[in-house]
Amino acid sequence: MIDNFLCFALGGLGYQAFHQRTLSASSVASAKISCFAAAFVILILTIPPVLIGAAAASTDWNQTTYGSPSPYERGQASQSLPIALQHLTPPFISIIGIGCVAAAVMSSADSALLSSSSVFTNNIYKNVLRPQASDRETQWAVRASVVVVGVAGTSLTMLNKGIVVFWFLTNEICYTLTFPQLVCVLFFNISNGYGAIMGVPVTLMLKLLRGDPLLGLEPVLHFPGCTLEDGVYVQYAPVKTISMLSTIVAILLFSYLASVLFNKGVLPEKWDVFKVKAQHSPVPLSPVGGAIEEEENEAMKGNNSQ
């Protein structure tokens, strides 16, 4: 329970859409206010889904046009909202409700497409693959990435397990992979690009070793409390938090190792892609404050004596 709570509470901090909203605020104060206000408003927004789910769970579906068995027994529990709107409300309410849901989904899909394409184009294509790319080429790269991401996202909806599985998986990836990167960048000066890259395989390795029932992955590494229930191993240890902390340790460890190897000259400077040696090179000290005033006074005294 604690593991899932931390995953949902801290995993959202790694979403690009969250920082897109905060960075677009008019001031730092407005960004802080919007974040704190959202923390309370989101609690209020959870009330309607809870009420709709409770109504769907307590309804005698045999007396509706849906019939029996219930959506849960048919394996359609994830579709409780559209089923409840269609069979438990008047037609005009159902149309308005489905339209609102569709509008919200399209808004989120549009934001995801634009953010994914812009992140790929600016951070990978323009900075790594084609640094000399022109503005027109960059625009075509954005368009191509939008098409690729759109086709990939649409193909995921055809899977039998549903898109809800990928929503949980995305949140877990943000918690175990993106959130450690964010923490290291903000609070640890030693972190660099080499540690960030090595954090990715560490996270994926732990994901494969601890298994995932939603993806059908059997656990190889059994943490304390792992039990066999109905032929499926269930990890009761906080495996997501363990993966998150392990990723932070891996990022800091490899960042420090890369910094030592390049600054000590063990590895040649031409291999330093992320310019770690330049970042941590000593800066010559310069007089500030009172020292500058003393030098100016001495210079004035020297001129007066001449």
Image (cartoon, rainbow, N blue to C red):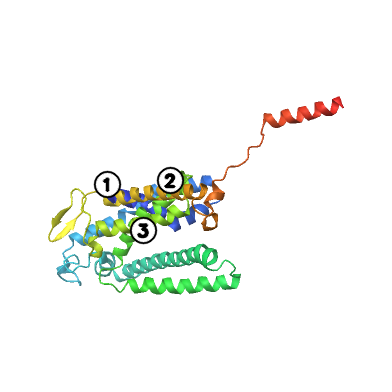
* Residue drawn where x is 27% and y is 51% of the image: 239
- Of badges 2 and 1, nearer the viewer stands 1
Coordinates of residue 166 in the picture (x, y in percent): 32, 64
- Horizontally, residue 235 falls left or right of residue 22, namely left
* Three-letter code for the amino acid on which mark 3 is drawn: Pro
Coordinates of residue 282 in the picture (x, y in percent): 58, 42
Q: Which mark is residue 201?
A: 3
Q: Residues within 10 Å of mark 1 (few under 14, many from 20)?
A: few
Label 3 and label 2: CA atoms lie apart by 34 Å
- On screen, 244 above or below 93? above
Task: Look at the numbered discs 3 and 2 and tell me whether their residues touch, using CB distance below 8 Å.
Answer: no
Which residue is label 1 attached to?
A: 2
Label 2 and label 1: CA atoms lie apart by 22 Å
In the rendered image, which quarter contains the C terminus?
A: top right
> Which residue is situated farthest in the right direction here?
306
Which residue is label 2 attached to?
A: 36
